[in-house]
Amino acid sequence: MATRMTSPLAGIRWLRDAINLGARNPRTLVLAAALVLVCGIVPSLITTGLQFLFPNNQAMFVLAIGLSALIGLALAPVFAGFLQVIHAIETGQPTHARAIFAPYHTGVWKPVIGFSLLMWIVYAIAFALVVWAAGPEIRQIYADLLAASASGTEPMPMEPMPPGFMRAFAVGGVCGLLIGGIWTIGYGQIAIARRPVIASLIDGIVGTLKNIPALIVLLLAAALLSIALVIVFVIIVTVLGLIAKFVGGWLAMVLLVPLYIALALGIYIVMFGLAYAMWRDICAR
């Protein structure tokens, strides 16, 4: 399946379509996103729980990270299932929220996990590039932060702008943009187009390189939208703080918890909506 080159302004269209996602079946979309959200926080809950039960234990810290990574890998097919649900909604096919678990029944979980393992290699390469670009000073700071996190001690204070930070930031930004495109296109090829693992990775790489201008426009548009949303969120939290001051903290908490949940659901829906819109324009027949 060949990948296509889109116009630079396609990035804005992808963001618009992601925001408007689910108009045909909003109930199923929100319920599916809620299930994905619950599955997505499982690895973090395990890591946090083990660190809470065994504080200042470096061996348990490493074990928690390993368990979190393995459980996250086992849950990767859920994300593919969510893309399948979005595809079904957008194409008018019948579906339901529990269909996010369909890859475990249809066998799609095997290529999804294989693709995820390949992406781990891509992540490792990107991380190595960022570490190399950072220079020895940043590497030492990162090592000190890891050691402090594992031992539960306070890290040493660092300079406001350590040498090599901007270089590492630039390399990390480029790697993040490319990895986002590769993951998005490749996952869509695995989950929806049912392409083989290696072919999906190649499609992801080629499709991303063909559409770098659109990805840059998408990044800029998403950054502007995020700034606007942060401003709105800060205003809402400020209002809730005033309510807590004059009425009571319990009422602010009652209002704030649903707000956080709605924000998390919105992030998941827009994120996967972006992934679907990109795959549809770059790969779908």
Image (cartoon, helix red, strand yellow):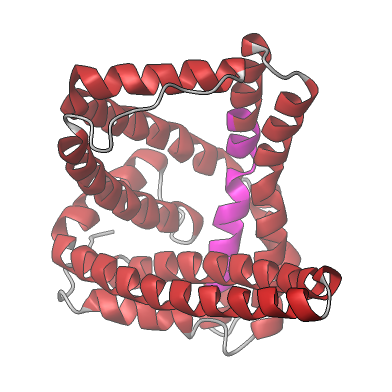
Q: Is residue 20 above or below residue 209?
A: below
Seen in the picture, residue 227 relative to 156 is either above or below; the reply is: below
The x, y position of residue 188, in whole percent, is 43, 58
Residue 251 quadrant: bottom right
Q: Quadrant of residue 213?
A: bottom left
Q: Position of residue 277 (x, y in %)?
A: 38, 73
Residue at position x 74%, y 67% in the image:
257
Region in magenta: 69-86
Query: How many numbered marks does the figure carry?
Result: 0
Q: Is residue 203 left or right of residue 133?
A: right
Q: Residue furthest bottom?
A: 24
Residue 73 image point, x, y percent = 58, 36
Q: Nearer the viewer, residue 169 or 273?
A: 169
In screen coordinates, is 264 left or right of 2?
right
Q: Quadrant of the C terminus?
A: bottom left
Residue 10 within the segment the image draws in magenta: no
In the image, taking residue 176 as reference, residue 67 lies left or right, namely right
- Furthest toward the front, the residue is 246
